Amino acid sequence: MKLRDTALDWAATVASVGGVFGALLTYDVVQRVAIRFGAHAHQRVVTGMARAMNVSTRFAGTRHRVEGKQHLQPGRSYLVVLNHQSLLDIAMASDFLDVLEPRYVSKRELAKGIPGVSFNLSRGGSACIDRKNPEQAVAAIEDIGRRAQREGFSVVIFPEGTRSKTGAMRPFRETGLRTLIRSAPGMEVLPVTSVGGSRLFRHNLKPITRNVDLEFIVHPPVVPPDPEDAEAFTAFVHRLEATIASALPERDRLGRAAQG
């Protein structure tokens, strides 16, 4: 039975990863054409790429569930605060939050060498930050915040700084979040919980785990305090952490997602 399960895990991994890379390669080319027709055309292609990636994970029995989209007000843009569980978080955000045409605060390393993803991050209006250069990172986040407010798109930021392999959330880093909120005054913060990625990739890709539920829970938007009020802002960040963590299953909160 164990040998059979292992064989099925690897077969599912090959099929899913093959589908994802096929989508990335195809949409890398399509993006380069679409961007010539403007930002909205490019974003529609990015949504298509994300959707194709998510569909490909179904070869591994993955199921997707989205809650709380009724909290999104048509025509509004948000500063989306998302916990980070897997490489698929960006794909899920681009798919499930497509009406927001989201851009991302992302580490600079992802902006090169990855078909589809790198072109979107480097040319689609996201902020690619150098985590070893705080001055550059702050300037890039300030720029995307101002553009989001001016152009009406949403920005996704992962305040943990890196993905959780156990499911347990890391403490949020305040600097990037404070910079983003300061540069986009008046924009509401939209907390979102991503669930399942840590379990799906608990062995990385050697192999992925079959029959995992990937969930995306959108919480009601909130008005942030003045980011210059240090005490109020820290309390606000802690409330964001608690809101996002509240939708995690117990095994994730305890850091046991990788155990099954």
Image (cartoon, rainbow, N blue to C red):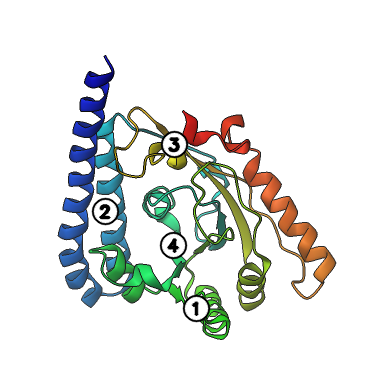
Q: Name the residue type under label 4.
A: Pro
Decide: few, some or many residues near mark 1? Use Cα within 10 Å; few <14, some 14-19, many ≥20: some
Q: Quadrant of the N terminus?
A: top left
Identify the disc placed on residue 29. Answer: none
Q: Nearer the viewer, residue 119 or 14?
A: 14
Specify which label sits upstream in the sequence, 4 or 3: 4
Marks 3, 1: nearer the viewer: 3
Structural distance between the alpha carbons of marks 2 and 1: 24 Å
Residue at the (50%, 76%) spot, across then down: 144
Specify which label sits upstream in the sequence, 3 or 2: 2
SS at mark 1? Answer: helix
Q: Name the residue type under label 3.
A: Arg
Specify which label sits upstream in the sequence, 2 or 4: 2
Q: Is residue 197 above or below residue 210?
A: below
Q: Is residue 36 above or below residue 48?
A: below
Structural distance between the alpha carbons of marks 2 and 4: 13 Å
SS at mark 2? Answer: helix
| Relative image position of residue 101 (x, y in whole percent) | 41, 62
Structural distance between the alpha carbons of marks 1 and 4: 12 Å
Identify the disc placed on residue 102. Answer: 4
Q: Is residue 126 visible?
A: no
Reading the image, the residue beneath label 1 is: 147
Q: Name the residue type under label 1.
A: Arg
Reading the image, the residue beneath label 3 is: 199
Which residue is situated farthest in the top direction here? 1
Q: Name the residue type under label 2.
A: Gly
Residue at the (47%, 77%) spot, across then down: 130
45 on left or right of 201: left
Marks 3, 2: nearer the viewer: 3
Structural distance between the alpha carbons of marks 3 and 2: 25 Å
